[in-house]
Image (cartoon, rainbow, N blue to C red):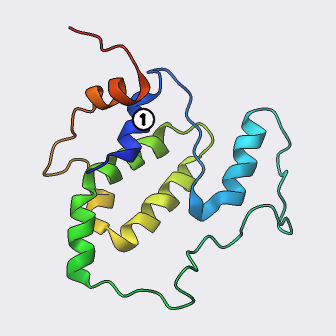
Amino acid sequence: MFFNYLYHLEAAPKNAKIMTMRTEHLVDDWNSVEYTVGGEKNILGPTQTVLAHNNVNKGSGDDLKYLSDESRTLICEKLCNEIQTYKMILQQSINLNEQQIAQSIEELAVNCPIEASATTCSTPLPDISDKLVNSRGYLKIEN
C-alpha cells in the first residue's frame, strides 16, 4: 500500500509549519492559506470562477457509485493508518481552527466512523524511511 499522507508528513522538516487545503473546503482553505502567507483575507469570493465550488467527481455522470456497508468498512480499515495521519496533519495545520478540524473529522466519520474516532490501528504505521531516501534522496540518519 502506498502511504501518501505519511510520505508527505515524514518528508517535512520536524518543525515545519503545515498548511492544509481540504478538497471539500477548497475555496475557504485557499483564502486561509493566502491570508496566512500575507495576502488578502478573502481573495476568492463566493462568485469566483478560478476554483470549483462543488468538488465532486463527475467522471461517471451524476450517478453515485454504490458501495456496500461491508466494502466501506473494509476500505476504511485498510486506510486506517492514512486516516490517522490525515488527522495528525489537520491538527498540525496552522491555517485551520478547531472548528474546521472538527468539521473534517465529522465528515470523515460519515464514511469511516471507527477510524475517525480511533487513535491507533490494528496495523502499525510502516517505516517509510527507505522510501524517502530512495525517492527524495534524503540522507538516512543512523542511530
Provide the secondary structure element on which disc 1 rests: helix
Give the total of numbered labels.
Answer: 1
Instruction: Identify the image quadrant of residue 79.
Output: bottom left
> Looking at this rendering, what residue extends furthest in the top direction?
143
Side of 127 relative to 21 (left or right)? left
Side of 37 relative to 57 (left or right)? right
Instruction: Identify the image quadrant of residue 136.
Output: top left
User: Residue shown at 27%/65% (left/top)?
Assistant: 76
The image position of residue 3, as x and y in percent, is 32, 45
The image position of residue 80, as x and y in percent, is 26, 55
User: Residue shown at 57%/90% (left/top)?
Assistant: 62
> Looking at this rendering, what residue extends furthest in the bottom direction?
63
Task: For label 1, count other residues whose C-alpha is less than 10 Å away and answer few (under 14), some (14-19) or many (20+).
Answer: some
- Given residues 53 and 99, the one toward you in this image is 53
Residue pointed to by mark 1: 9
| Quadrant holding the C terminus | top left
Instruction: Identify the image quadrant of residue 142.
Output: top left
Q: In the rendered view, would you say 64 is above or below 111?
A: below
